[in-house]
Image (cartoon, grey):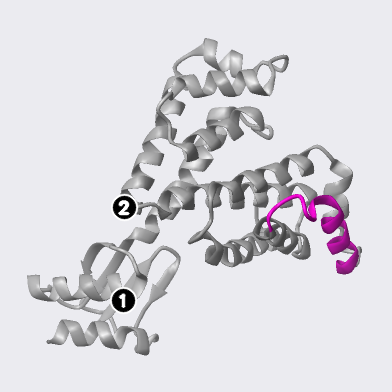
Amino acid sequence: MAGVSSTSLAAALQSLEPKLATASIALAQELFGILGLLDSNAGLRRALTDPARESGEKAALVSTLIGGKVSTEAESTFASLVASRWSSARDIGDALEVLAATAAIAVAEGQADGSANLDKLEEELFAFIRVVGSSHDLQRALDDAQATDEAKSALALKVLPQASAVSALLIRQAVVSPRGLKPTALVQRFVELVAKRQQRWIAFVSVTRDLSAEQLSRLQAGLNNLYGRDLKINVNIDPTLVGGIKVTVGDEVVDATAATRLAELRRRLAV
C-alpha cells in the first residue's frame, strides 16, 4: 500500500489509538466481520471508495450496512475509513485488516505486563508458522477449498491448544480469510504488527555523554511517567547531538525542538 492509501491508513491508525486503551476483543471481531462483508462484495468496495460519490451518500451506505449491528466504536472506525481516499478498492479492505489486527494485539498489550504479553503473542504466532510450515499435510488441509471454515478453524487451533484468545482470533482469521495469501503468510503479517506494537515499549535515547546509574534511573522514571508505561531504555551516545537529548518511542520522536516535553527529563538528568 502506497501513496494516498498509505496516508489514509496512517490517519486511521492514529484515530484508532485512543480507543485501544479500553478496547475488548469484540472490537477486533467486529472489524474482521465488516472486512468479510467487504471481501464478499466487489461492488460495495467500489461504491465505498469511489471518489466521485458524495461523502453523505457513502455515510448513508455505511449506516445501512452496519448501523445498529456493531458497536459505535466499530462503526465509527469503519466510517472514518470510508470517508478517506484510497488508491484502489482493495486498499480499504487491507487497511481494515490492519486496524482489526491492531485492535486485537492491543487487547493483549493492555493486560498486566503488556510488553511480556506481546512477546508471548509473538511466540504463539511464530509457533503456528513453524508447525504449519513444516507439515505439507497441514498446509493442504488449511488450503482445501472444500473444507468448511469451522473445520479449518478447529484444525488450526489444534496446532496451539493453549493459545491465548488473541492468538486464536488472529490464527482463525488467517485460515478462514487469508485474502489471497497462504495462512502462514498472513500470520506473518500479524507478527510484524505485533513487532511494531512492541516498539511502543522501547525508548531509544540519544545523549551527548555517558549517563551515571543515578541519571539513568531518573531518566527511566521520567520516561515512564511521560508515556504512562514501563519502558525499556536503549541509550546511544552521540556527542554531535544538538539539545543534549533525543528520545524515540515507536513512531514518536521527541527531540530538542520539543523543549517543553524534554525540559523535565533534562532537569532530572542534571540533578
Q: Position of residue 21 (x, y in %)?
A: 48, 61
SS under mark 1: strand
Predominant secondary structure, magenta span = helix
How crowded pointer 2 is (Cα within 10 Å; few <14, some 14-19, many 20+) is rated as: few
Residue 243 appears in the rendering: no
Residue assigned mark 2: 113
User: In the image, 112: left or right of 191?
Assistant: left
Q: Position of residue 182 (x, y in %)?
A: 60, 28
Residue 226 quadrant: bottom left
Q: Which residues are magenta?
A: 55-71
Residue assigned mark 1: 246
Q: Are marks 1 and 2 in contact (CB under 8 Å)?
A: no
How crowded pointer 1 is (Cα within 10 Å; few <14, some 14-19, many 20+) is rated as: many
The type of residue carrying mark 2 is: Asp
Residue 101 within the segment the image draws in magenta? no
Name the residue at 19% across, 83% down: 268
Image quadrant for the C terminus?
A: bottom left
